[in-house]
Amino acid sequence: MRQLTPTELAAWLADSGRADPVLLDVREAWELQICQIEGSRAMPMGSVPARFQELDPDAEMVVICHHGGRSAQVCMFLERQGFRNVINLAGGVAGWARQVDPNMAQY
């Protein structure tokens, strides 16, 4: 499974010469109310098996959770479904808040 650090993701999103990835946030709704990376798409982990067909299997996708554990599980699931361009955000939104956006609310 491919991994990306928060600073690597921030550099990717800032690169106007590169298409942005799909940012798939698999946290629960209450977590999204606290904080989220701008432009992310919410799909709670428990709903992914029923909803993954809504996603483009060819799109570059960064999967996000709180610390990187749930997103790693979702990445493995999506890879088993034939997705080839899924990347886990190592450290999750907690890492993003520490490394990229210190103004982001944390929990």
Image (tube, helix red, strand yellow):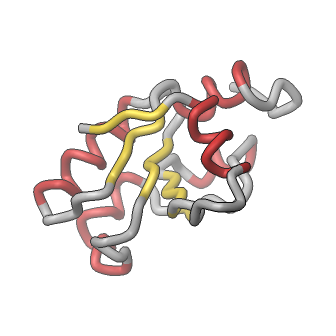
In the rendered view, tell whether residue 42 sits above or below residue 63. below
Give left or right: position of 25 versus 38: left
Residue under the point 65% across and 61% down: 17
Residue under the point 37% across and 33% down: 3
Q: Position of residue 25 (x, y in %)?
A: 52, 52
Give left or right: position of 42 versus 33: left
Q: Residue furthest right?
A: 103
Q: Residue furthest front?
A: 17
Residue under the point 69% across and 47% down: 36
Which of the pair 56/12 is nearer the observer?
12
Q: Position of residue 75 (x, y in %)?
A: 28, 47
State the count of labels.
0
Quadrant (top left, top right, bottom left, bottom right) of the C terminus: top right
Residue under the point 49% across and 44% down: 64
Quadrant (top left, top right, bottom left, bottom right) of the N terminus: top left
Q: Position of residue 18 (x, y in %)?
A: 59, 60
Examine the image and state in which quarter residue 38 appears.
Answer: bottom right
Which of the pair 97/84 is nearer the observer?
84
In the rendered view, tell whether residue 23 sits above or below residue 87. below
Q: Residue furthest top?
A: 98
Q: Position of residue 23 (x, y in %)?
A: 54, 57
